Amino acid sequence: MSGMHMAIDTLKVMARHAETLFAAHMENQGTLYDTPENATAIKALRTHRLIWQLDSDADHYQMSQYVTQLLDHSLRHYRRHQADESVQSIWMRLTNHLLIQYQDAKRRSLQLETKRLSQDLQECLHELIELMQQATLTFAYYVTGGFTYITDLELRLKENEYVLERARKLNDVLDSFKLDELQQIAGADPLLRRLLLKYLPDTLTFCRRELVDSLHKLNNLLLRLRSNVQQHRLIAAFEARHERQPGWEPSIEGIMRLPTALLKAEPWILVAYPNTDDSQHEPWLSTLASGIRHSSPQPTDEHVLIDVEDNCFSESIQPETNPLQVAADIVFQEVIQHDLTLNASDAYQLLELDCPIDDWLLTLINALGSCTGGIEQAILAEYIEDPDPRFPDQFWTRDIRISQRQTL
Amino acid sequence: MNQTTLFAETVRLLLEGRIICAISHESSYDYLEQDHHFQAVDEFLQKIERKLARTTDHKAFFTVYLIPNEDSADKAIRNQFKEVVLHLESLVKFLSLCRVSQPGAEPLSAGSVLYESELLSAIEQSSAAQQLLDDLAKGRFVHSNATDGKGKLKTLMQRLIEHGYLVSVGRSGAHYIATAKWSWLYDTMSFIQAHEGYQEEQVQLETDSAQQEML
C-alpha cells in the first residue's frame, strides 16, 4: 500500500469514528473505554495506530497525541469560548510543570533538557498569549455584531447575559496575574524575566484594555436589549388587550399622580405685535404700511387660488322656460289688452297650473317686479289679505287682484 | 446659530408643544443636553408655570405643567390623554406592523430607519401584515380611501409625520426616521399598563374580600 493510500485510509477511519473520538477527547481526556459499542471503532483505530494501550488487560485505550493535537487545533474556536478555563489550565501547566522542570534542569546543569524545556516554555507562553488575545477579540466581535444572528429578542438578551458573564470571568482571570508574583516566579533568570515580565505583561495590558472596552459595550448592549425586550412585551400586552377587548380605552379618571409623560403642556401659541410708539420699529412699520397701500392682497397659504375648470357653459345651453313665468306674462298681457280685473286664484284655475297656489302668487309678484317696457307701471296688484287670528297685525295674503292702473 | 438664538428657538419649540429629540430638532436637542442650558431653559419655563422634562430613556425633551393640579392644567392634561387614547390602538397596530414586517428587528424607537419599499414588500408577503395595514387604513388615525397597499401605507406614513412620530429624509419621500416621540408614547403606555395592572389587582382584591365575607 502506498503512503498516499495509507494516509487516506487513516483519514477515512477518523471520519467514520469522528463522534467516538470527539467524545473521548472532550469527556474523558482522550481515554476510549473498551465497551461493546466502542468495539468496532477500537479495532479500526488500533489498526491505524490512532489509539494505543500499554497494558493489554486494561479496560481502556489512549488517543494518540497526534489525534489530540489535531482535535485541539480544530477546537481552537471552541476553546476561545471557554478561554477563562483554558487560560488557567495553560498557566497551571506552565507554572506547575514546565517551569519547575526547567528550573530543576537548569540547577542540575542539564544543557539539553534546559534547552528543550526553554523551548517548551516559550511555546506554552505563546499559546497562552495567543489564547488570551483571541478570547478578548471574540468579545469585541460580539459587540460589533450585536447578537443579531439571534432573531428572538428574549434569546438575544439571554445570550448577551451569558457572554457578559464569560467576559467577566476572563477579566477575573486576567486580574489574577499579579506583577509581583510574576517577578517572584521569574527571579533572576533572563529567559523567564523576558517571558514573564515583558511579553506576558504587554499582552495582559492589551487584553485588559480591550476587555474593559468590550465589557462596557456589552453592558450598554445589555441595557438596550433589556429596554427592547421591555418595549416588545409592552406592545404585545397592548395588542393582546385590544384583541381581547375591542374598543378598549384606558382612563386616568380619579388618578392624582400622573407620570411626567402625561403632564405634557399643551401648545402655547406666541403672537407678537409691533409697538407703534417705539421709534425703533418705525422704519419697519412704515415699509410695511407703504406696502399695504400699493400692493394688492396676496393670497395666503391658507387660501391658495386654484384654477377651476368651469364646464357649465362649455356647450351652448338654452335656458329653460319657466311655465309659471310664461303664465304670469300672459295674465299681464290680457289685463292690459282687454282692461280686465282678474283675481290670481281665478287665473290659476283658468290656466290649470300644476303647482301650489302659493308658488303662483309668488311668481306673479316676482314677475311684476321684473317686468320692463312699462308693464310694471300699467299693472296694479292689490293683495287680498286676512289678519292672523293670534297676531292681528300680521296679514296672510290669500289672493291678488290684478287690474290695469288707471291713469289720471 | 448663536447661544441666544438657540435659547429662543428651543424655548419657542418647547412652548409650541414640540417633543425635541436628536432626530427632529438636532441643534436644540444638543443645546439642552448640556446641563447649564437645561437649567437656563427650565428656569425660564418655571417663571411661566411650566417645567422642562425628558423621557425615561433621555432621548427627548418636552414641556410639562409646573402645577398639574391647577384647574386649567388638569383639564388640558386630561384632554390630551383623551387624544392619545383616541389614536393609541392605531399606533400600537403600527408598532406591530413594523415588528411583523421585520422579524427580529428591535422595536421602533428614536433613530429607527424605515423604508417604504421594504415595508411594502414585507406587507405583500405577509397576510398578518396586510391585515394590520387594512385595519390601520380604516381606522380614524389614518382614514385612507386608497384601495391599494401602497396608497394606504403612504397615507399612514404621512399621518405619522404630521403627528411627529416620523421625519421624512431624502428626496424620494419614501425614507423615514423615527423620532423620540415613540419614547414618550412608550412612557405613556408603561404608565397605562401599570395603572391597568393596579386596577386589575384592585378588582382581584375586592373579589377576594367579597368571597371571604361570603364565606
Image: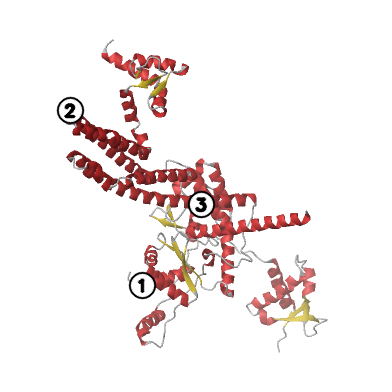
Q: Along the polypeptide, which appears first: circle 2 or circle 3?
A: 2
Query: Marks 2 and 1, Cα distance to the nearest angstrom?
Result: 81 Å
Q: Residue at x 55, y 43 (%)?
A: B128
Q: Quadrant of the N terminus of chain A?
A: top left
Horizontal relation, residue A330 to residue A13: left or right: right
**Which chain does the residue under circle 1 lie in?**
B
Q: Are marks 2 and 1 on the same chain?
A: no
Q: Which mark is residue A112?
A: 2
Q: Which mark is residue B5?
A: 1
Depth check, front residue: B54 or B211: B211
Depth check, front residue: A284 or A34: A34
Neighbourhood count class around disc 3 (C-alpha, 10 Å): few under 14, some 14–19, many 20 upward: some
Q: Is residue A133 visible?
A: yes
The amino acid on which the numbered mark 2 sits, given as a three-letter code, is Leu
B205 versus A375 height, above or below: above
Neighbourhood count class around disc 2 (C-alpha, 10 Å): few under 14, some 14–19, many 20 upward: few
Task: Check disc 3 and report its element: helix, strand or loop.
Answer: helix
Which is closer to the viewer, label 3 or label 1?
3
Q: Position of residue A206 (x, y in %)?
A: 27, 47
Q: For residue A57, what is the image quadrant?
A: top left
Q: Can you identify the residue that label 3 sits on?
A: A230
Depth check, front residue: A313 or A181: A181
Which is closer to the viewer, label 2 or label 1?
2
Which is closer to the viewer, label 2 or label 3?
2
The amino acid on which the numbered mark 1 sits, given as a three-letter code, is Thr
Q: Position of residue A337 (x, y in %)?
A: 72, 76
